[in-house]
Amino acid sequence: MSDLARYRLVLAVLALATLILFLLSLTVGPAAIGFGDSLSALFSEKRDAIALIMREIRLPRALLGLMIGATLGLSGAVLQGWLRNPLAEPGLLGVSASASLGAVIAIYSGLSAAFALGLPLAALAGAVLAVLVVQAMAGLRGGALTIILSGVAVSAFAGAMTSLALNLSPNPFAALEIMFWMLGSLTDRSMTHVWLAAPFMLAGWAMLASLGRSLDALTLGNDAAVSMGVDVRRVQFLAVFGTAASVGAATAVAGAIGFVGLVVPHVLRPLVGARPSRLLPASALGGASMLLAADILVRIIAPGRDLKLGVLTAIVGAPFFLWLVYRTRRQLP
Amino acid sequence: MAGSRHPSCALCAGTAIAALVTACVPALAAEAPKRVVSMNLCTDEMAMLIAGPGQLYSVSYLASDPGSSVLADQAGAYLVNHGLAEEIFLMQPDLVIAGTYTTRTTVALLRRLGFRVEEFAPENSFDDVRANLKRMGDILGRQQRAGELVAELDAGLAGLEANKPPDKTVALYYANSYTSGSGTLADAIVKAAGLTNIGDTLGLTGTAKLSLELLLLANPDIIVNGDSHYPKPALAQENFVHPAYQALSGEKVAIPGKYTICGAPFMLEAARILQDAARKPEGAAP
């Protein structure tokens, strides 16, 4: 099988898996509605309880699972390609945690209630700040260690500030919501959240997806890429703002979900070859599959307990991360 | 003699804590305490209702929060505490009243320091409320006042029974999608109002999650959503702005949380609000 044929096959399989998981996500929930009934209720004219459940509860949940998973997979692949660092990922770089902080400030101060776009914009601002700080600390060609260390520091700081903001809120429920912002959840999100996040995510995807060829060139090294006509500043701008817009919007509506952006590109890289331009679409589909699967499992494992998504992604992701660190350590001189 | 109590307790504490509990408490119970500190909202309210003039010295800071406490106006007459061992030690009370679920470490520390601490379990039924009112009366030496409150409660319950509205289904739907199933105070209030609690029909016990999906399927006649009196928003209340929740046809009734947080005669007020809502004709403007 030729390289290209294999790549297309991988994409087709991932797309099929994503579609199946999307449909499954629509049919899993506490209200026991049959598979056929639930899907037909989605398109029926009636406005009974089942139609309401399908359209206003399960559809936004499945859509957000799809979009957020794709966001995390895509941004993970771009960050790993751009920083040429196997450990880069929105969660580890502190992007998710900082976006959480922005969202928390917007929601609990009442800003998002007064001005709906305040929520995704504040999350975006937090995310941009995190990437810029990490990058400034590590330099454009920063080693794995400096990037991860600054990411850890930014994450810890943003996490602490999030906890502080929630603890200081005069609303006693706020402090209990620290868990949501650290681990993420899609429970009872509504179409309002979809409409709020979708434009930012789509804009972010467009920026990130346009980077494929430049990232291919960057695999040959910075100087080689420049000599091939790659505008390094433009790549940086698109990677930073594309990640910030899409991950910021994702985090603003679902909290910080870790490890998806780390695991998915690594699993798929051997399958599509080392070219980043091929990894980007595959990672987006893979991320969507992983998040949809996690969100389905959350509802099956502990129905009625609102298990957080980050718990499941970390159970898969943390051992993988350890293995990755182990491998990276062996490669160091 | 009030002055002789502390030295004797200190002596007991010097030997063993177990000895303190068994030896000192019965001796103290014989005489009504004169400087009582309560450190739990529910015991605050009960003590304010029952204590004699000058007997109650301090109540918790929650007692003066008008969103949580029915007796917020009266609470200003007492010193405020935050359930911290240090501040309570400085108040030198001869009796500390606490809830069994709150500030466990503080209670243990106060006992070590030789204070008499009486703990009250949260009430889950009207029987629990009667028992706790009577016990508070015994502890404060105000049996007669406690008896009056129990009689008031029973008369109120009889009034609710006599005044039953048509049987309707009620869903209790709180922040974070929690509800009260069977064996809870809120369930007892719904039943006392002569109505059917959806949480109970769905087989939920205690305080449990009621998913929005199941609430939509149950489609209750009345939805009790508590009230939010907090100055800033939280995600916990987002379930009330969810489009699917907004589309529910049942009548939404806000029962101020202060009437249902604690087992007290105020619960009758919550049941009356429910009965009024149930008497409204179907489809009437909210």
Image (spheres, rainbow, N blue to C red):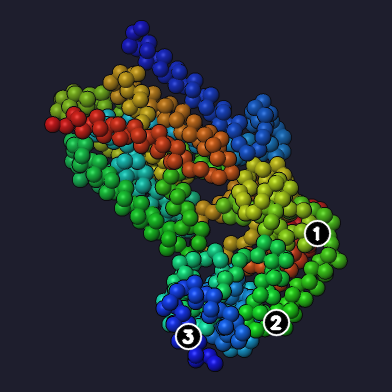
Q: Position of residue B110 (x, y in %)?
A: 46, 74
Q: CA distance from mark 1 to mark 3?
A: 53 Å
Q: CA distance from mark 3 to mark 2?
A: 27 Å
Disc 2 marks which amino acid? Gln
Foreground of the two, A266 or B19: B19
Q: Is residue B88 visible?
A: no
The answer to whether A69 appears left or right of B32 in the picture is: left
Residue wearing tag 2: B143
Q: Position of residue A212 (x, y in %)?
A: 31, 25
User: Circle 2 marks a residue in which chain?
Assistant: B
Residue located 34% across and 28% down the image: A265
Residue located 36% across and 7% down the image: A1
Element type at mark 2: helix
Q: Position of residue A32 (x, y in %)?
A: 67, 35
Instruction: Please tell me the numbered disc located at residue B265.
Output: none
Element type at mark 1: loop
Disc 1 marks which amino acid? Gly
- Which mark is in front, 3 or 2? 3
